[in-house]
Image (spheres, grey):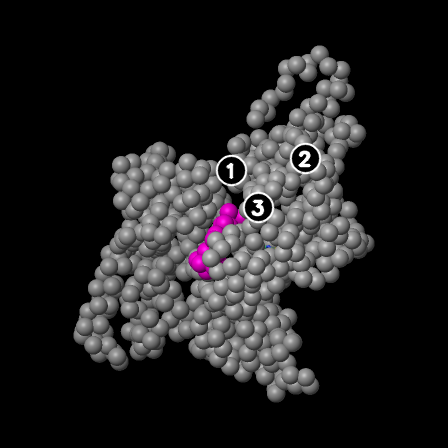
Amino acid sequence: MQTERDPSTIDMPGAARSAQRAAELRALLHHHAHRYYVLDAPEIPDAEYDRLFGELQALEEAHPALRTADSPTQRVLGRVLPGLAPVRHAVPMLSIQTETDTTAAGAEAFDARVRRELELGADAPPVEYAAELKYDGLAINLRYEAGALVLAATRGDGETGEDVTQNIRTIGQIPLRLRAEQPPRVLEVRGEVYMRRDHFERLNERQREKGEKTYINPRNTAAGAVRQLDPAMTASRPLSFFAYGLGEVQGWEFLAAPAATHGAMLDALAALGLPVSGDRRVVLGAPGLVAFHRDIEARRDALPFDIDGVVYKVNSLELQRRMGFKTREPRWAVAHKYPAQEQATRLNGIEVQVGRTGKLTPVAKLEPVFVGGTTVSNATLHNIFELRRKGVRIGDPVIVRRAGDVIPEVVGRSLELAPPGARPVYVPNFHMPRQCPVCGSEVQREKGGIDHRCTGGLFCAAQRKQALLHFAGRRAMDIEGLGDKLVDQLVDGGFIRTLPELYKLGVANLANLERMAEKSAANLVAALEKSKTTTLARFLYALGIRHVGESTAKDLARHFGGIDRIMGASVEQLLEVNDVGPVVAESIHTFFAQPHNREVVEQLRAAGIHWPEHEPEHEGAAVATPAAPLPLAGKTLVLTGALPTLSRDEAKELIEAAGGKVAGSVSKKTHYVVAGEEAGSKLDKARELGVPVLDEEGLRRLIAAAE
Ligand code: IVH
């Protein structure tokens, strides 16, 4: 698309010229917003988008008559509503049957039911299904008339919902205008507004930095944001949307086709500019459903958003019509759940633990419960503020959540599960201790009042232990065999007071420890030796600087290229690093301003820890020598399937060390897809988009060739 002014307008009268230019700008901005928000493949830099946006704003300012409802400038209207108005749905918003048997049998039961209702004999061919994700957010109906978004409503009771049009307009992914020359007269699109987990984390990070309250989970946060009375508030929440169905439709020829399918309908919605998930597949019969259920279950925690199951729908719209509805649910669809990541249990007590940075965490002692695939008996309550907000008391039934690798947490009291009339056995007026329960040092309440911290530093055995465990962790220095039992002994026995002392341990003194034989001592010494060859990002992360997680460590390493430049960086220079804000920059700067921390770095290097360094990526990061480009600089790769020798993490590290980025999904912006055994839909997508596909060997060659 062209962004310059059309020369044929030069002879037009001023008003007509302005009107034409405004229309042109609207079309351009709609196009680029779709590339940016929906396809994740912008064609122009942000600054150019802003320039076009500014030009349209100025035109509308000068000629208010040019301001149309679907203008991209009209997303945030900034009017606070007294309440949300009720909206009667033209077509009721149904709910969906839920299959709670989380095994393959759940999928088989649905297929059997469909075949029975369609009166298919045993030898009839398998039924075709559209299999998709069950997004965990808030159902929304979007009404487009002649291509323009005119109304957005929540589901409500299915018959009547709430008018949330103003709020929904602020979601960049939702088109204000459909991409079609001749849009349907009426098209109601149904789907889910949700919040990605990374966006949720970042939102909470911002809340913490501001000392404001954090949100519990992405689903409630998304639902709350949609139902705000102040659209500016909604606009400040990072919301996303996926379309999965239709409401009222008039004049859309697509639906008239006799062979129309649900899958093709979603493709058609995508073509109209609506976000539709790529994680969907058309499958055959029960085996196809089972395979989809398994595949998604395996990838569940790696998806960028929460799901609580998958949804199967009979693919043929004709068969859907034939099957029809049962009161409030279609007979042709089912939600197949996954094992819950939340469970109810009883809170038996609260203990205070001291973490790596001295933070005191109230930890719930629970009646052991099976959740998220393991038995959980301890779960974090985060801090006193959260604990009070949740109002949990000893003896209460509580909800515990454990998702993937995340530390189990108490989400709140389980009201439904409390037996009628039950009273908590004991209601402690829980206070954080004034002295560290481990070392007795003074406990300070932080500015903002949320966290309590032991001031003992590395004098505190708990902090020393956690610092060692973090340092040795798989994603840090990766010292195999250095677990919590051993760390307890090393610290409690006075063998180690500082990190560098770890590398002074010899087989002789290790072998004297409990449960340590000559052999395991030798293994640990070998693991320590092996850990000395590392990367700058791992080393930085291992140091345990507050607010420096893995991704910040990687950004720092990429930006500065060497440890001395990082240690010498000013707060301003640190702020130039991608995603580093004032709190993080201050923390890094303060850390390296402490002589004893610089000494730890020196001693670790003297012990033989080393990594490759490179020239800084940014001019601001000191010295003027131009940076040698890394072999995969600027390249985005996607991994799929099992590679023959590299694990996912190792492949990612290899790519990142070569300057590349690893993305979760394939788009036109992807430069390469690296595929292994049992590669799934990402490989199909790569072929569809013509993205080059490599195997592990190819990846290695690519990196070597460019070096
Ligand atoms: S279809 C007529 N598909 O699950 C069938 N629903 O009660 C209508 N949901 O609140 C639903 N992902 O918002 C459908 N891929 C998906 C879905 C989905 C999530 C939600 C929906 C509704 C609930 C079903």
**Tags 3 and 2 touching, CB below 8 Å:** no
Where does residue 587 sit, x and y in percent of width and height?
48, 55
The answer to whether residue 376 of the structure is visible from this angle is yes
Look at label 1 and name its amino acid.
Ala
Label 1 to label 2: alpha-carbon separation: 24 Å
- The boundaries of the magenta stretch are 275-291
Q: Position of residue 76 (x, y in %)?
A: 71, 43
Which of discs 3 and 2 lies nearer the camera? The answer is 3
Q: In the shown orientation, is residue 498 left or right of residue 369?
A: left
At a point 34% along the width and 61% down the height, the residue shown is 474
Circle 2 residue: 183
Label 2 near ligand 1 (CB < 8 Å): no
Q: Could you tell me which residue is drawn at 57 percent across and 49 percent down?
A: 316
Question: Can you give x and y, in whole percent of width and height, for residue 631 in the image?
Answer: 32, 38
Instruction: Work out whether residue 589 can be spotted.
Output: no
Q: Is residue 288 left or right of residue 232?
A: left
Give the Cα distance between marks 3 and 2: 20 Å
Badge 3 amino acid: Thr
The number of discs equals: 3
**331 lies above or below 81:** below
Tell me if residue 531 comes above or below residue 461 in the rendering: above
Residue assigned mark 3: 261
Q: Name the residue beneath numbered marker 1.
A: 41
Residue 236, numbered circle? none
The residue most toward the bottom is: 425
Which residue type carries mark 2? Pro
Classify mark 1: residues with Cα within 10 Å, few (<14), some (14-19) or many (20+).
some
Neighbours of disc 2 within 10 Å: few (<14), some (14-19), many (20+): some
* Nearer to the camera, 559 or 227: 227
Q: Tell me what residue is drawn at x 22 percent, y 72 percent.
A: 520
